[in-house]
Amino acid sequence: MEQTKSLIEAIIQGIQEKKGKEITTVDLHHIVTAPCACFVICTCGSPQQVSAVCDSVEEFTRKLVQQKPSAIAGRQNGLWVAMDYGTVMVHIFLEEARGYYELEKLWDDAELTQYPDID
């Protein structure tokens, strides 16, 4: 679990570095049917920012915890990028896509943690 916490911290730093907003973690580790232990979700203001946040998360996780995502989906469309780190899934959304999918609401019994926006 400590390794997962370090990974989440690196992911959040990567998001904050490029001014990703509304950062939320969804703790799923106690939910048997969940696809991973945690979601990290953020909102971006443009497709270019989605791409920049994705690159930054990759850089921070590689440098700080020596981990690379096993897969990245959606990088081409710039609306929603999903990064798979095994125990942690990162979801980088444009605002309208995040509002449409509402990933935070998929598991009612998951613990949500909000992180401050860095301006």
Image (tube, grey):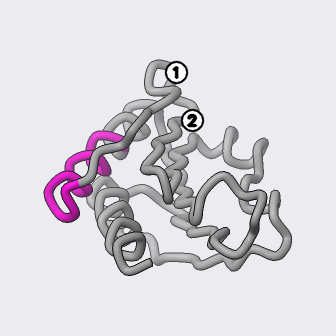
Element type at mark 2: strand
Q: Relative to 34, is 19 on the left or the right?
A: left
Numbered tag placed on residue 32 in the rendering: none
**Circle 1: residue type:** Asn
Name the residue rendered at 43%, 39% in the picture.
50
Q: Is residue 65 left or right of residue 111?
A: left
Q: Main secondary structure of the magenta part?
A: helix
Q: Report the side of 17 relative to 88 (left or right).
A: left
Quickly name the residue at label 1. 77
* Region of the chain picked out in magenta, as a range: 54-66
Label 1 near label 2: C-beta < 8 Å? yes
- In the image, 80 versus 85, the foreground residue is 85
Write down the quadrant of residue 33 in the picture. bottom right
> Closer to the camera, 59 or 96?
59
In three-dimensional space, the C-alpha distance between marks 2 and 1, rounded to whole angstroms, equals 7 Å
Q: Residue furthest left?
A: 63
- Quarter containing the N terminus: bottom left
Toward the viewer: 35 or 115?
A: 35
Residue at 20% over, 52% down: 62
The amino acid pointed to by label 2 is: Trp
The residue pinned by badge 2 equals 80
Give neighbour class at mark 1: few <14, some 14-19, many 20+ (Cα, 10 Å). Answer: few
SS label for mark 1: loop
What is the crowding at mark 2: few (fewer than 14 residues within 10 Å), some, or many (at least 20)?
Answer: many
Residue at the image position 47 percent from the left and 36 percent from the top: 46
